[in-house]
Amino acid sequence: MKYLKVIAFTHKQIELKELGRLVICQENLTEKLQQVKNQFQIAEIFYLATCNRVEFVIVTDQVVDAAYTERFIDSLNIGVCDHYMGVFLKGASIYEDQEALNHLLRISCSLESLIVGEKEILPQLRKAYDCCREAGLTGDFLRMVMNCVVKTAKEVYTDTNISKNPISVVSLAYRKLRDLKLCTNARVLIIGAGETNFNISKYLQKHKFSNFSVFNRTISKAKQLAADLNGEAFELEDLKNYHKGFDAIITCTSSTEPIITPEIYSILLNGETDKKTIVDLAVPNDTAPEVLEQFPVNFIEVHSLNEVAKKNLQERYAELVHAEVIINQNITEFITMLKQRRIELAMRQVPEKIKEIRNMAMNTVFVDEVQGMDEQSREILEKVINYMEKKYISVPMIMAKDILINS
């Protein structure tokens, strides 16, 4: 495993806005990787690029250090100037041997992510590898590495609580909203067309909610979000003239004063008296305190959700110990599997050699004696030799594996 090397550029040492300079255009990816693979005599290579990391996983017997990394990046011809080359070399992390495998396993389990426990990194890693595998840039060794990576990540996500509890305010808000068991044709008013409301409305749309009305100061943004949701768009001022009723309000604006006052809320109710739901993700809240005092409301607000998010994040970090135990176990198993695979590759010629010896014995060395046997004797001899051939093939393989693993 000493030939496994990783050159990593991540959010931990390099600003996210700078990492983009290392991203290789997908159209030129195979060509550029093949070029450096040939130039640096790399046996296998694959490349990973996400929003917070760019990494090169290579199999080589060469020393990978800062000088190697500089030549490597320069050879990719992606336009890195001297200034940024210095930034990248200073922030680069280089791993090899077991450290490299440990690093890849930690990535796949999201232990190295901006948000511990997020599951997006594993499919990103698999896609990156598959892309390079299909291009013929990888081989048997990285195939084994990726099998270990996927197996480990699945065990961590299954056997620990590292990803169980959501830590994004939007996902927490959706879960609370879901627990209220609104029907999918519930009338949902979206106040504000920013990223937060876009994200939570997409959650709702994904789960078959379909009745949306969007209000925003800038009508063009309201129309854009409404078009995505197949809903209606209104200016924010239209709240005081809206008489279609509602079942839930989702609000998040940058206003410093409450948007939903008792007067506006009363107009929106349009005479309905049942308990409604407000999801208020604005800071400060868009909902006036008097609304909660005067009307029956299921109120979901950002402050309490933030507290839950912080608690969930702490619980995820507590699971790191369990995840690292699983990682170490898989590294140990991988080392054993790698030794066994080396034996299999080294002894691939054993069966052919044994068959050659058999043919030499039957057709040359003892050809006269065999031809002098009657048919029944030759059949018995054939059975004995077939039996011995199978045993001679399996026994040395088993013994070699045992010797290497035990040593």
Image (tube, rainbow, N blue to C red):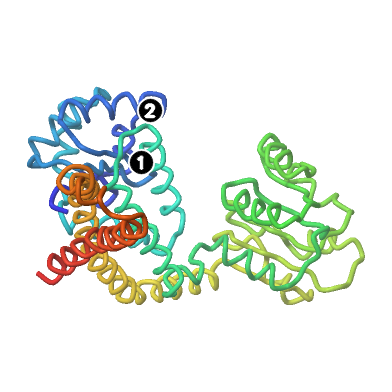
Q: Amino acid at mark 2?
A: Cys
Q: Which residue is mark 2?
A: 25
The answer to whether residue 101 is above or below residue 29 is: below
Q: In terms of secondary structure, where does tag 2 sit? A: loop
Q: Which residue is mark 1?
A: 49
Q: Are marks 1 and 2 in contact (CB under 8 Å)?
A: no
User: Are there few (<14), some (14-19), or many (20+) residues within 10 Å of tag 2?
Assistant: few
| Residue reaching furthest to the right | 271
Residue at image coords 20%, 43%? 59
At which x and y percent is residue 19?
Answer: 30, 39
Nearer to the camera, 404 or 187 = 404
Q: In terms of secondary structure, where does tag 1 sit? A: strand
Instruction: Locate the C terminus by quadrant.
Output: bottom left
Q: Is residue 214 left or right of residue 174?
A: right
Residue 6 visible here: no
User: Are there few (<14), some (14-19), or many (20+) residues within 10 Å of tag 1?
Assistant: some
The answer to whether residue 72 is above or below residue 4 is: above
